[in-house]
Amino acid sequence: MINQQIPEYFDKIFAVVEKLQNEEKTTYRQSLVQVLSTLVAGDVTAADEEQLSEASQSALTSLQSINWQDLSFSDQRNVLQLTLLKADRQDQVSANDQLTPDGIGYLLGDLLYQTANLTAESTIMDMVVGTGNLLWTVEETLKRYDLTVHEAGIDNAETQLALASVTGEALHQEQTPLFWGDVVDLAPDAVDPVDVVIGDLPVGYYPGVGPADFVTTLSSEAGKSYAHFLMIEKSLDLIKDDGWVYLVVPADLLTTANHEAILKLFSQKAQLKAFLPLPAEYFKNQERAKALLVLRKPGVGPKQEVLMGQYPSVKNPEALQEFLQDIKAWGKLK
């Protein structure tokens, strides 16, 4: 049963977002960052009193009627997701900046739990954290197994990081370590290697020149390199020697143009563990269908068959449950 406080609090929060957007002439996302910051702080700050109009301050004060800490983690996340979805719709944000749907996050989180040997000391890093929704969805999935881990994120968009930061603080009452920067160009010692890297990779051309030592960097004759190719390769630099990588990638990754670069990566620098196209109904346009890609560094763990197979429709719960059991059995062989 849906907690009735979810739609109630969503309406209250977004009413304030709209008031600030109109008063301060900002984007809906920028207003949402301000509103959630005030919700977390519990009151209007001295800086806000200097910078915001009296009408905006009055609207922010109305947030005090929300008993935020009375909500469960799951309910808090649902409220945050609804407000972000509406802000994105109002701002008409690009496809690469939109949050990762929960359905994908739940499947990725379950796959991760079944295979990665996580403990309470493990750290999961989202290499393109965006607004944080994928990371928080995976966290919710792990909580269902009574497992809590450390988290971190990287992104090169300040607005995205601001949203990830404030939603993370709203969920945890503390800051999640977040790093600003181009993950492909990240210095080797910029972040400590982690146990698990996740990410819903943006698809398109990399705006700069790909690293010369990357096998997925396309030659100048071939034009610009693909950002998602480079990020797949970079993910291996972010994990410990025995770490795992779980990425949301195009379902045609292994057959698309220049896919030879990915196959070369798998033969030289990565161990392909799994490639699992997601349920078809998740995507209105099948040309934009996604899959879960699982990698490890070469030579890590016992050799086994690559796990491959299409996730069944979520409308067929028996087939889906059987598929998840197959994943569980495969994970025990790792």
Image (tube, helix red, strand yellow):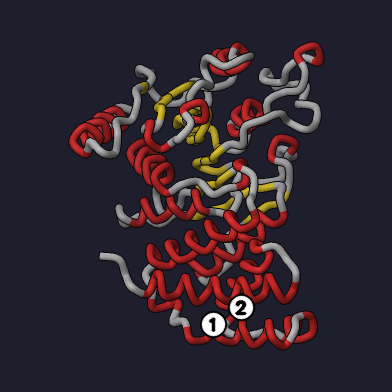
Residue at the left extreme?
Answer: 318
- Give 249 or 117, whichever is nearer the viewer: 249
Quick one: label 2, few (<14), some, or many (20+) residues within 10 Å? many
**Identity of the residue drawn at 75% across and 13% down:** 222
**Identity of the residue drawn at 48% across and 66% down:** 171
- Give 287 or 184, whichever is nearer the viewer: 287
Question: What is the quadrant of residue 218 in the picture?
Answer: top right
| Disc sitting over residue 63 in the figure | 1
Counting from the top left corner in percent of width and height, residue 307 is at: 36, 23
Counting from the top left corner in percent of width and height, residue 291 is at: 45, 30
Q: Secondary structure at mark 1?
A: helix
Question: Label 2: which residue?
Answer: 38
Three-letter code for the amino acid on which mark 1 is drawn: Leu
Counting from the top left corner in percent of width and height, residue 250 is at: 52, 28
Q: Is residue 253 left or right of residue 30?
A: left
Against 315, residue 29 (above or below) is: below
Against 216, residue 235 (above or below) is: below
Question: What is the quadrant of residue 325 in the picture?
Answer: top left
Counting from the top left corner in percent of width and height, residue 212 is at: 78, 21
Residue 220 in view here: yes
Contact? badges 2 and 1 (CB < 8 Å): yes
